[in-house]
């Protein structure tokens, strides 16, 4: 697979303190979702800032410079301008000429107060929605999300999962962090753990437990040939899919776009 960005032996140290990152190796291929588990202070946010070229490594090498969309763990929302005005301003700074998707994107995220709500009046969760909109607006090659589900309401959780799946579907990549194993395994193709500045891969066996059973109603399509679908059983217009871990959001999105209705989504029995 084509690599978008690669970290080789990357370390980060502030002054004479202990290293925040220590010999990190990470390859981010195109069209993959990478989830990074870790507690507060483990080095996750520093790693994302280096991937986003917002911080320089102290040692090691970073190869590649993809176009990045970045959502920090806390979006700086204490500004007088409205959500719409802020996104228009940031989009123009990024060279984006077509601004027509701003309103629909904020509507999709169900921003409380609407697109003209002043940023300084927003809750943490709603400010997070504006930050997410900014990160995805220009269709980046690499979408970097720091604890993106934190503070979002249930409906926005679903939309965020769809946006992650859509990013992967168009061949771009996503790197995100979370401290919850279930959230990481549910959305990521590849899972890593950050602990005291060291990054290790989590064995795929942990992900096998998160295969999903999806029941659809509708006609048409060879679901057995779809990416991420390991089994498809059709009975008239009822279709039962077994979907590999990390592919459920993308499969659901394709089903809805094709006019299918979703009757059931549940973890597969072990």
Image: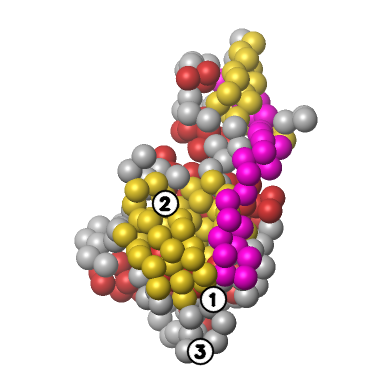
Question: Residue 135 appears at what percent x and percent y?
Answer: 41, 63
Front one among 58 and 262: 58
**Residue sitting at x 65%, y 72%:** 40
Q: Is residue 138 visible?
A: no
State the mark number for residue 20: 1
Front one among 197 and 77: 197
Question: Mark 3 against mark 1, which lies toward the viewer?
Answer: 3
Question: Residue 118 appears at what percent x and percent y?
Answer: 47, 79
Q: Which residues are magenta?
A: 193-218
State the mark number for residue 199: none
Question: Residue 92 appears at what percent x and percent y?
Answer: 25, 69
Identify the residue under disc 3: 16
> In the picture provided, is 170 more to the left or to the right than 210?
left
Secondary structure at numbered mark 2: strand
> Looking at the picture, does residue 81 appear above or below residue 238?
below
Q: Residue 236: which quarter of the image?
A: top right
Please tell me which of labels 3 and 2 falls first in the chain. Answer: 3
State the mark number for residue 28: 2
Quick check: is 198 in the magenta stretch? Answer: yes
């Amino acid at each position: 697979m084509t690599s978008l960005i690669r970290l080789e032996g990357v370390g980060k140290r502030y002054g004479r303190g202990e290293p925040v990152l220590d010999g990190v190796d990470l390859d981010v291929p195109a069209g993959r979702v990478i989830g990074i588990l870790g507690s507060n202070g483990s080095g996750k946010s520093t790693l994302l800032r280096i991937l986003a070229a917002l911080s320089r490594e102290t040692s090691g090498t970073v190869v590649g410079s993809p176009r990045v969309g970045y959502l920090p763990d806390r979006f700086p929302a204490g500004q007088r301008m409205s959500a719409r005005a802020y996104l228009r301003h940031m989009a123009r700074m990024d060279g984006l000429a077509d601004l027509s998707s701003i309103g629909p994107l904020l509507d999709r995220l169900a921003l409380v107060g609407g697109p003209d709500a002043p940023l300084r009046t927003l809750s943490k969760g709603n400010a997070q929605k504006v930050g997410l909109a900014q990160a995805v607006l220009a269709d980046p090659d690499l979408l970097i999300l720091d604890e993106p589900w934190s503070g979002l309401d249930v409906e926005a959780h679903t939309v965020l999962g769809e946006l992650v799946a859509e990013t992967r579907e168009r061949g771009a990549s996503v790197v995100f962090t979370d401290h919850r194993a279930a959230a990481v395994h549910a959305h990521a193709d590849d899972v890593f753990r950050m602990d005291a500045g060291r990054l290790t891969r989590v064995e795929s066996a942990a992900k096998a437990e998160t295969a999903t059973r999806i029941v659809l109603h509708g006609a048409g399509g060879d679901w057995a040939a779809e990416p991420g679908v390991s089994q498809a059983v059709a009975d008239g217009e009822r279709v039962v899919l077994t979907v590999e871990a990390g592919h459920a959001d993308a499969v659901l999105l394709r089903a809805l776009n094709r006019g299918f209705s979703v009757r059931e989504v549940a973890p597969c029995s072990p």
